[in-house]
Image (cartoon, rainbow, N blue to C red):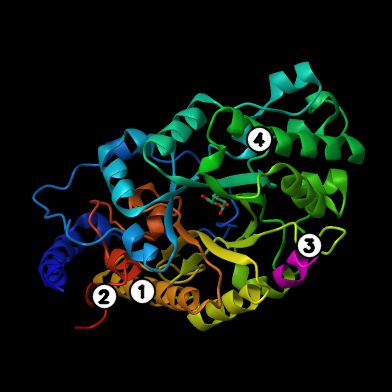
Amino acid sequence: MKWKQGLLTIILACSLMACGSKQEQEQPAEPTVTQAVTVAPTATPEPTATPEPTATPKPTEAPGMKEVFAEHNMKAGTCLSHSMISNKWCVQTINKNFNSITFENELKPDAILNQAESKKADDLIVKFNKNTLEMLEWCKTNNMALRGHTLIWHSQTPNWIFHEGFDTKNPLAGREVMLARMESYIKQTFELLESLGYLEMFYAYDVVNEAWMEDGNKRAESMWLQTIGDDYLWHAFYFADKYAPEYIDLYYNDYNEQYKKETLYNFVQTLKDENGEYLIDGIGFQAHLYTEDNLEDYFATVDLLASLGLKLNLTELDVCLGSWPSIKPATEENLRIQGQYYYNLIHGLLERADAGTVNMDALTFWGFADKLSWRSERSPLLFNRLNIPKYSYYGALQIKELAGFEE
Ligand code: GLA
């Protein structure tokens, strides 16, 4: 294809410029050995602080991600933060590449549960703040499909919701009270989205996020678990199934999926109603990966979970350089390896989707710009700090000759 040849020249020039930049060559700080993937993100850095790249040709001839994925009947998604909708480059990049949006923070429990209103009503009350409302409207104006994220989670969930009188000074509320609050919260979320005219934009919703540990146990710190008991996950899906419209697929979403595959395989089969029908529609693999994560293992996980016949989406894809305990710097070589990794991963998924062995209707990246990523110092995404597409971008686009493979 002619555009590919033109692009190759442009990209080689871009890569050279990018690799020569100081920022990209700096050794990233040693990773702290904490639970990086589970820690709640702090506020997203403002995109406006970034200098616009000067004299950098923009390869506008390449198709956008959404066109490439559409050939495989899949949506291409990104997470969205509020600051992005007023940043010209972000808006252009999103509109060119993506047709599905997951709010990075603005539909999480701590963003939508209102303490004052809950105390007044003696019920757990859902209320959207200004940022959430502006983002919903932006998505409507820009014709985006939406993945809701997330209802029941141990993190970014206010403590007061688990206490009598919605006040942490009081004792924890009992099981029946918490079941009633859970039902009301889930019901109101769908009702509010409907009354505001946004519900039809949603095609998927993460009902529960990150409930399982790698050792096969439920995450003990979940206050939902502590107040309701072992069956809280079943109830969450039962209520979501009761109140969500049919067209919204209900998801269980988790990270480190390749280390939890048997646990997840057994768990989702418990999410059935009294007639043996699934209360869940899909499994979300967050896919916070590293270039040294074994792809064969990853595909084995995909194949095992897909064999249940439920949908399977990648929901938060990013691929850091190196491995979790030992990240690597953004050198030319490592960025090429990352490009190849994106290419191979997405290639394997698209092949499976085309063959019908995996029911995947969307693949969401956890952002697109390294400088805006929650793992920014690990260079995990598609555009470098100068907003220039990386090998990873072309890898994800399945343009093999630009994805960092040896020429
Ligand atoms: C998890 C959550 C996301 C996000 C990331 C960190 O993966 O599911 O919503 O908080 O952590 O950004």
Give the labeled residue for mark 1: 343
Q: Are marks 4 and 1 in contact (CB under 8 Å)?
A: no
Give the labeled residue for mark 4: 189
- Which residue type does callout 1 highlight? Tyr
- Pick whichever of labels 2 and 1 is earlier in the sequence: 1
What residue span does the magenta drawing correspond to? 264-270
Marks 2 and 1, how far apart in space?
A: 9 Å
Q: How many other residues sit within 10 Å of disc 3, few (<14), some (14-19) or many (≥20)?
A: few
Q: Nearer the viewer, mark 3 or mark 2?
A: 3
- Which residue type does callout 3 highlight? Glu
Q: Is residue 174 visible?
A: no
Q: Where residue 170 sits in the image (x, y, percent)? A: 86, 26
Q: Is residue 182 visible?
A: yes
Q: Which residue occupies 79% across, 28% down?
A: 168
Give the labeled residue for mark 2: 404
- Which residue type does callout 4 highlight? Thr
Question: Residue 223 got which mark?
Answer: none
Question: Residue 277 got which mark?
Answer: 3
Q: Are marks 2 and 1 in contact (CB under 8 Å)?
A: yes
Q: How many other residues sit within 10 Å of disc 1, few (<14), some (14-19) or many (≥20)?
A: many
Q: Is residue 268 magenta?
A: yes
Quadrant showing the N terminus:
bottom left
Marks 4 and 1, how far apart in space?
A: 37 Å
Q: Which residue occupies 39% across, 55% down?
A: 377
**Vertical comparison of 152 with 188: above or below:** below
Q: Main secondary structure of the magenta part?
A: helix
Q: Are marks 3 and 1 in contact (CB under 8 Å)?
A: no
